[in-house]
Amino acid sequence: MLNETHDPKLTSWVPGADRSGGDFPVQNLPFGVFRTRGAYEPWRGGVAIGDMIVDLRAACGLGVFNGLAGQAAEAASASTLNGLMAMGPTAWSALRLALSRTLRTGGTEADSLRSCLVAQESAEHAVPAQIGDYTDFLTSAHHMRNAGKIFQPDAPELPHFKWLPIAYHGRSSSVEVSGANFHRPLGQTRPPGAGQPVFGPSKRLDYEMELGFFVGAGNRRGEPIAIDEAEDHIFGVCLLNDWSARDVQAWESMPLGPFLAKNFMTSVSPWIVTMEALAPYRCALPREASDPPTLAHLQPRDGHVQGGLDIQLEVSLQTLSSGTTEMPLSRSSASHGYWSLAQMLAHHTEGGCNLRPGDLIGTGTQSGPTRGEEGCLLELSWGGREPVRLANGETRTFLEDGDTVIMRGWCERAGHARIGFGECRGTVLGSLARREI
Amino acid sequence: MLNETHDPKLTSWVPGADRSGGDFPVQNLPFGVFRTRGAYEPWRGGVAIGDMIVDLRAACGLGVFNGLAGQAAEAASASTLNGLMAMGPTAWSALRLALSRTLRTGGTEADSLRSCLVAQESAEHAVPAQIGDYTDFLTSAHHMRNAGKIFQPDAPELPHFKWLPIAYHGRSSSVEVSGANFHRPLGQTRPPGAGQPVFGPSKRLDYEMELGFFVGAGNRRGEPIAIDEAEDHIFGVCLLNDWSARDVQAWESMPLGPFLAKNFMTSVSPWIVTMEALAPYRCALPREASDPPTLAHLQPRDGHVQGGLDIQLEVSLQTLSSGTTEMPLSRSSASHGYWSLAQMLAHHTEGGCNLRPGDLIGTGTQSGPTRGEEGCLLELSWGGREPVRLANGETRTFLEDGDTVIMRGWCERAGHARIGFGECRGTVLGSLARREI
């Protein structure tokens, strides 16, 4: 539902907010948790606008927001956004409206809020919620088909992919915010043709370009969330990199799924773009998503006319040789996803599983239908058989030490503002020191 | 390492502690979180002894314990045991020794502690820790072989089972303490021979008889815990029922493992028996666990002479017809497990994954080598093909509405006290109301 906060004609008095191609115009207003870099001060909630962050804790101290918006800002002043997430969409919307009316050009209370701005370049971020559980889905039919063909060229498609959104539980302890780096994981793998496995650094380290979304109000165990109510339980969307050790994954995953292959690190972008901010960029799910017809328990009343999200996604790489130059690896759109966020969330609870505010849910790798739209190196290099040529002449099959993966996302549509997600970045460090082996 | 707390000659002045066959003699001293049933009072840590619970919060109020034991008791007075768990084995051991010296016959400070006892029958329990992440392993070769043959009679054994402890991430939000019940989950399944799936109540609902263990001090991301240090990071062991919807599992699990099949509910017993209490009941791992030889990163210096745990496990059933009579279903021992708890924990961290105090790790179904030792109905009824006859003449292939599953565990060995785990109990309620389908 569009409202005055989406008006593309709105501008803002905050530096950088009206810059063409910027991620954070007044129509966006994403939430995160921040503090001044290196300072001994509390983590607290903030909202990105232009080059700045609205410090919600400071704003509460000055009494800038009233009523439900004020309560929401108070909840968002904590060191995590769980309290805000638990409040539900009416509160989120009230705070968004109050922020918009203050931050827009000529806005009310602008003078008070001006003193609550912190420069983004002086801030550092934390994971924006205490994540009780992290779940990751597999919802791109293109990723599913590519990965299937790479591992087993003659295998049929997964028979259940078009009937339910496939998912597994991930590791919440190792979810980190953009900028955190990690050592190449050690692990057990079985080299091709070898009689027995070996233990050592992963040789097939990969990223996965995903969206993540945070659960708003949760549900009680045993009380599923119906498909038509599901979206009200989604606070917003971030970028997510599901780093993966493919050789570990291939050896360990039967029959219980990936474990060490993915639990050494998962990165999220610091900013969560709310579902309300994403309203102008909704789209239909892909045509194939209604063939076969979705079973009733996952079929919304409106047939998911606007189930999809047209979010542009881009991955680029910096290597030790390239320095700060970002070399594009691939580009796609979340609109190719087979299952909607609402379907994922409703499915998650249909057996009685309880979600809690701040739970993180990944969409799985967002690969598109054509070459160049693959969301991971496994697909881009076709299982390591076709090295990817980078802009500086280097090649990659999988990630090398020192590589930095940068994901970006944004929405643009005629007649609407462009809004962005910022970036989700992480660097592969050398492998963990081998202990006495 | 045995010490004075394990002395089988010790008796206690607490009612019920010296009862033959009881679970909670003074040699046990397991930790849990409790409050008076239905009372408006805080959850806090307690220790089971005989028919009573030592209220550690009350004991701290009276200053019963000093030094490190006092600090540990203080940490254990909170509403979860995470703080105690984070302190590590020296602190756990100090508190155990202080408790033992007070609770034994003729103990010091007995008069003070007498006023801190609460009757177990008047108490209710909470999950003893805030569980950041829950992981479940598959470490019984017998369960692995049985399940494999049931699903695919001609399939070979899993090639990696003997090289690494297989595991997946579970759902921490739906871990509940013994006594919590649940509705039969709805889910998508594909009936045999059907062209398309259906949505409805699971028809193949099962339990899994497991041990769980709680992580003590954790590790930082990127800093694995070496195999020889792993046991110092284990606080203690409980009983765990990994309720499973087999028909949902069969349809959803490829390629990412079980999801809705297991996330509707997991039950744990209220009492955590510490690793120190379990010291007299250690045993070698099974012979087959050294063939093939374990790779160095999972091989302890002592070759795991005492890697195993000889914990007797028993499952029984109450049905709507049987009333409170408990009908035995199966009995086995955790000593049949292929991988040790230390191997599971070290493996979990080898790629850099961080564990946090209070994380819960399940061992997987503890099936033994012979008929009658199977740890779940899937195996006992051989995939539903051979109904299990109960003592009252009823039969079961899978669980029916109203069935109550009761798990018990205990250790006994010549020359040592018998210690027990109490029980882990849960009842299957009718399926969730079908929403508009």
Image (spheres, coloured by chain):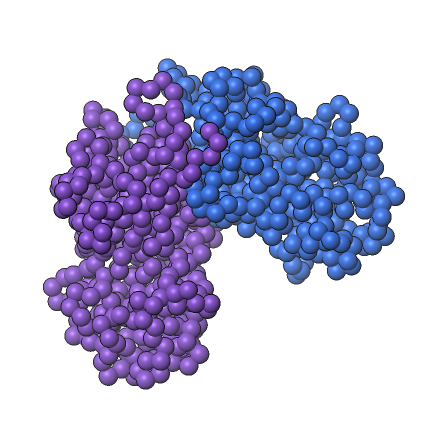
Chain colours: A purple, B blue
Instruction: Check the picture and name the quadrant holding the N terminus of chain B.
Output: top right
Instruction: Identify the residue shown where x is 16% and y is 65%.
Output: A21
| Left or right of A155 in this view: B62 | right
Residue at coordinates 68% horizontally, 28% vertically from top-left? Answer: B281
A307 over B226 or under it: above or below: below
Q: How many marks?
A: 0
Q: Residue furthest top?
A: B154
Residue A183 position within the rendered picture, expressed as x and y whole percent measured from the top left? 37, 43
Q: Quadrant of the C terminus of chain B?
A: top left
Left or right? Give the position of B301 relative to A132: right
Would you identify the image quadrant in which residue A395 lies?
A: top left
Specify the farthest residue to the left. Answer: A414
| Viewer-nearest residue: A421 or B70 | B70
**Residue B48 versus residue A233: which sits nearer the camera?**
B48
Q: Quadrant of residue A393?
A: top left
- Tell me where residue B347 appears, x and y as whole percent: 47, 34
Residue B432 visible at all: no
Q: Residue at x 77, y 58 (%)?
A: B63
Taking the image as drawn, is residue A234 in sight? yes
Relative side of A235 to B405, left or right: left
Instruction: Give the farthest residue toward the right.
Output: B106
Q: Position of residue B257 (x, y in %)?
A: 38, 34
Of A45 and A133, the residue lying toward us: A45
Q: In the figure, B228 relative to B91: above or below?
A: above
Seen from the viewer's position, the closer of residues B415 and B353 is B353
Q: Looking at the image, is A334 positioned above or below residue A275?
A: above
Residue A333: x and y in percent read: 19, 51
Residue drawn at 60 percent across, 47 percent down = B85
